[in-house]
Amino acid sequence: MRKNIVGILAFAALSIMSCKKQLLMTYESANSIYFAPAVFNMPLGSSPLLDSTAVSFALGGSSTKDSSIKLYVVVTGAPADQDRAYNLVVDSDSSTATPGVHFVEPAPIQYIRAGKVRDTINLKLLRTADMQDSNYKIIFRLPPNENFNNAMEYKMTSATRRLNYTKYTVYVTDILKKPARWLDAYLGSFTRKKLFLICEQLNTTPSYLDAQISVADVNFFGKYMQRYLNQMAVDGNPVYEDDGSRMTMGPSVQ
């Protein structure tokens, strides 16, 4: 009986040791790579999860020629002790923006540096005249390679909404909308040329006219600009709109 008990205990000990060895086995598959804003709010705080972003030059003033944004890439798993290459591909079939014209194309090979699990890519967008009439988009993809897979591809957030983890879209435009606080009675009919002339003469910005200016200041802007336009005409340099008509402010400041 004693021998049987000893044998059972020995078998149990071997079984436990075997289980422990199995628990110590490591997962050897490649880690997943994804765009960070689609998975967690970095560095956007409490903003919603996103697989796209939009950039508008319209409120940046006429002197703005380019803009830079950041793309954030993260990988699963622990940091490695060496740099790990990954692929960043511009989907030319689906994108409408042209590399070298509307944006500076990032290098197709990027790196998760040693000791890191994330990377930041600076994307430079270039302001062009055709953006005043059209919206453009740049679609980036993270294909798998020898270091990373894209097993984390997307998830459905509703019956029709897909949140992409390995595809990120950047929309860019220069289409200028009428500022929210623009009052025709004082500033006249809205035109792009008039807006930028007001900003130049009064040292202000389109965003101020869109969200901050008071009615009293709109009245002042209209009167100031009408005096300026009148003086330009007296000096023999009348200001014309792009359609050839004389630029004027609103009826309340004539």
Image: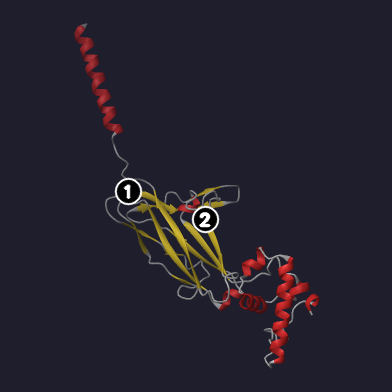
- Disc 1 element: loop
Q: Is residue 216 visible?
A: yes
Q: Which mark is residue 240?
A: none
Q: Which residue sits at x=49%, y=59%?
A: 168
Q: Are marks 2 and 1 in contact (CB under 8 Å)?
A: no
Residue 102 place in picture, x, y as percent: 50, 73
Q: Find residue 10 and report its image quarter.
A: top left
Q: Amino acid at mark 2?
A: Asp
Residue 24 place in picture, x, y as percent: 28, 34
> How many angstroms separate mark 2 from mark 1 (CA)?
24 Å
Instruction: Return the residue at label 1.
Output: 79
Instruction: Return the residue at label 2.
Output: 51
Q: Neighbour class for label 1 at 10 Å: few (<14), some, many (≥20)?
A: some
Residue 234 place in picture, x, y as percent: 72, 91
> Is 219 placed left or right of 80 in the picture?
right
Q: Neighbour class for label 2 at 10 Å: few (<14), some, many (≥20)?
A: many
